[in-house]
């Protein structure tokens, strides 16, 4: 052996690195005609005896390679997302087919992958076959239980209140990973589409008492957030107190959610107590979500001094102050009749966004300065800030109120424009209901839905109608209301025209690209 190769060979023999595995074979694309025939047989013979279904499926030329079988199963099961029987019977047939093609009889089971296992559990969960879902879940090897598979299983077991079966999932994993798996299961049960914090709490207690798994602070955080979002503040406080007894510190998400929920339930003093406890405990407010919520509610209540203190704390800890926070501050100043100070804050911002403009306009409308709010709306458009639907509805309610006000000219007033517009749009039922509520004003509160009205006229016909209405309103001296409706007709009702133009641009660009290619 040459002397230069000896050290190299010695290092290779002592190396602990494992050779890289061979790349998995790429599955061949499934024939669409074969897939259609297979799914047709499965659908038509899903209640047929095994022999008859086996004869039908045996007449098809199905692939035998494991990768091709997995691809065929994924595509076929996608045709039956809510029906477990065709998928289960296909799985049995593919298992028998793989067993017959394997050498030595060692491949009797279907060659599952994490993707096929997750798809199978998802179909079983959506179809509601809980027993088959449970048995299939515990029969699969642990290496196939990916996060998607566990998520599909819990979404099927949790709505059925199968607490024991969900808690037993932690036993499929080693003890060192069970706490993390319990946190993952709690997250699935507390989030959409389940949103079942009571079931998640029972799963945690069952895992603690029967399987010896200790809950983490993250589990209780998820319970507090889920209970608050479902409106169960008492249950959230019970979990919160349990965390304090066990010595677990709540996270920033739990603090933010319980503070917001207490503000919504008119418990401002308790919310500020919890917020002060968060600051004393040193919990870092990631992103400033809790500070933003506290400042927003303080501004809505008119407690501007407290909002200034929270604002200074946000600047101190380095939280980014955006237009929404400044808009809330301006709104709070306006509601306290501190107009000059509110304008000083508004003018001090260089890059103004729509949230800041909305805060100023909402505050002006709150103190009955609808004309000044319309001037801010004109300035907003002049600076290139595009209004949205909320902008128009807010201004219309500020000028006309939630139930509408009659104008000076009987031909150009609320009934002739808005109620008559509903009749013109063919919405006579909505117009009749509003008129009936107006006649019975002592019993029912007549509120007009400006959102639906503007939606009905968001088309080419609405552009002409709002232009004509704007002319009539200017003739009787209602300049502000005329500008609002005319601007809506120019900008919002032409969105169909803009969409068609954009689609035409996209189609022309695609055709040019095809020609160039």
Image (cartoon, rainbow, N blue to C red):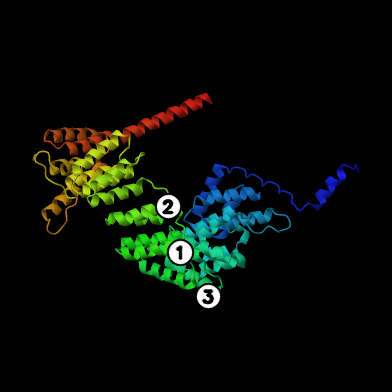
Q: Quadrant of residue 479?
A: top left
Nearest to N terminus: mark 3 or mark 2 = 3
Which of discs 1 and 3 lies nearer the camera? The answer is 1
Q: Quadrant of residue 252?
A: bottom left
* Dot 1: element: helix
Q: Give the quarter of the figure containing the N terminus.
A: top right
> Residue 335 location, x and y as percent?
24, 51
Query: CA–CA distance between discs 1 and 3?
Result: 30 Å
Q: Residue at x 26, y 33 (%)?
A: 490
> Residue 367 location, x and y as percent?
20, 49
Q: State yes or no: discs 1 and 3 in contact (Cβ < 8 Å).
A: no
Q: Residue furthest bottom?
A: 209
Reading the image, the residue beneath label 2 is 316
Is residue 379 visible in the rendered structure shown here? yes
Which of discs 3 and 2 lies nearer the camera? The answer is 2
Figure disc tally: 3
Residue 169 vs 299, above or below: the answer is below
* Dot 2: element: helix
Q: Residue at x 39, y 29 (%)?
A: 504
Nearest to N terminus: mark 1 or mark 3 = 3
Q: Residues within 10 Å of mark 2 (few under 14, many from 20)?
A: few
> In this view of the protein, which residue sits in the foreground, 229 or 416?
229
Residue 182 vs 391, above or below: the answer is below
Nearest to N terminus: mark 2 or mark 1 = 1
Reading the image, the residue beneath label 3 is 209
Query: CA–CA distance between discs 3 and 2?
Result: 45 Å
Reading the image, the residue beneath label 1 is 281
Find residue 187 and name its label.
none
Q: Is residue 74 left or right of residue 475?
A: right
> In this view of the protein, which residue sits in the foreground, 178 or 377?
377
């Amino acid at each position: 052996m040459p002397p230069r190769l000896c050290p190299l060979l010695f290092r290779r023999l002592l190396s602990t690195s494992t050779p890289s595995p061979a790349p998995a074979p790429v599955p061949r694309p499934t024939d669409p005609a074969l897939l259609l025939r297979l799914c047709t047989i499965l659908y038509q013979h899903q209640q047929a005896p095994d022999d008859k279904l086996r004869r039908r499926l045996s007449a098809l030329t199905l692939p035998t390679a494991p990768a091709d079988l997995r691809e065929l199963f994924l595509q076929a099961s996608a045709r039956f997302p809510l029906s477990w029987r065709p998928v289960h019977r296909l799985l049995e047939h593919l298992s028998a087919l793989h067993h017959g093609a394997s050498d030595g009889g060692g491949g009797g089971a279907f060659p599952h992958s994490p993707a096929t296992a997750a798809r199978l559990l998802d179909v079983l969960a959506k179809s509601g076959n809980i027993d088959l879902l449970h048995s299939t879940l515990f029969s699969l090897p642990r290496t196939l239980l990916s996060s998607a598979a566990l998520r599909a299983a819990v979404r099927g077991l949790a709505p059925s209140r199968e607490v024991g079966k969900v808690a037993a999932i932690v036993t499929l994993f080693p003890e060192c990973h069970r706490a993390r798996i319990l946190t993952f299961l709690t997250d699935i049960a507390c989030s959409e589409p389940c949103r079942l914090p009571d079931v998640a709490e029972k799963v945690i207690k069952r895992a603690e008492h029967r399987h010896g798994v200790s809950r983490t602070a993250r589990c209780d955080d998820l319970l507090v957030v889920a209970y608050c979002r479902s409106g169960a503040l008492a249950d959230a406080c019970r979990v919160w107190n349990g965390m304090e007894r066990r010595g677990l510190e709540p996270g920033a998400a739990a603090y933010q959610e319980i503070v917001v929920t207490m503000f919504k339930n008119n418990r401002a003093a308790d919310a500020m107590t919890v917020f002060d406890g968060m600051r004393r405990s040193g919990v870092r407010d990631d992103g400033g979500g809790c500070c933003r919520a506290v400042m927003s509610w303080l501004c809505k209540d008119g407690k501007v001094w407290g909002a200034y203190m929270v604002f200074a704390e946000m600047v101190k800890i380095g939280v980014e102050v955006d237009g929404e926070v400044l808009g809330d501050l301006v709104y709070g100043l306006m509601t306290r009749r501190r107009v000059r100070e509110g304008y000083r804050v508004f003018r001090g911002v260089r890059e103004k966004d729509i949230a800041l403009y909305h805060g100023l306009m909402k505050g002006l409308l709150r103190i009955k300065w609808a004309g000044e709010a319309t001037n801010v709306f004109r300035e907003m458009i002049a600076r290139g800030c595009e209004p949205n639907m909320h902008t128009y509805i807010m201004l219309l309610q500020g000028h006309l109120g939630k139930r509408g006000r009659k104008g000076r000219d009987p031909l150009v007033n609320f009934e002739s424009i808005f109620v008559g517009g509903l009749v013109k749009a063919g919405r006579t039922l909505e117009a009749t209901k509003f008129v009936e509520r107006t006649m019975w004003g002592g019993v029912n509160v007549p509120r007009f839905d400006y959102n639906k009205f503007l939606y009905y006229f968001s088309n080419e016909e609405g552009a002409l109608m709002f232009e004509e209405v704007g002319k009539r309103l200017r003739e009787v001296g209602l300049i502000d209301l005329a500008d609002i409706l005319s601007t809506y007709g120019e900008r919002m009702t032409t969105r169909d025209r803009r969409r068609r133009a954009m689609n035409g641009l996209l189609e022309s660009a695609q055709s040019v690209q095809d020609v160039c290619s």
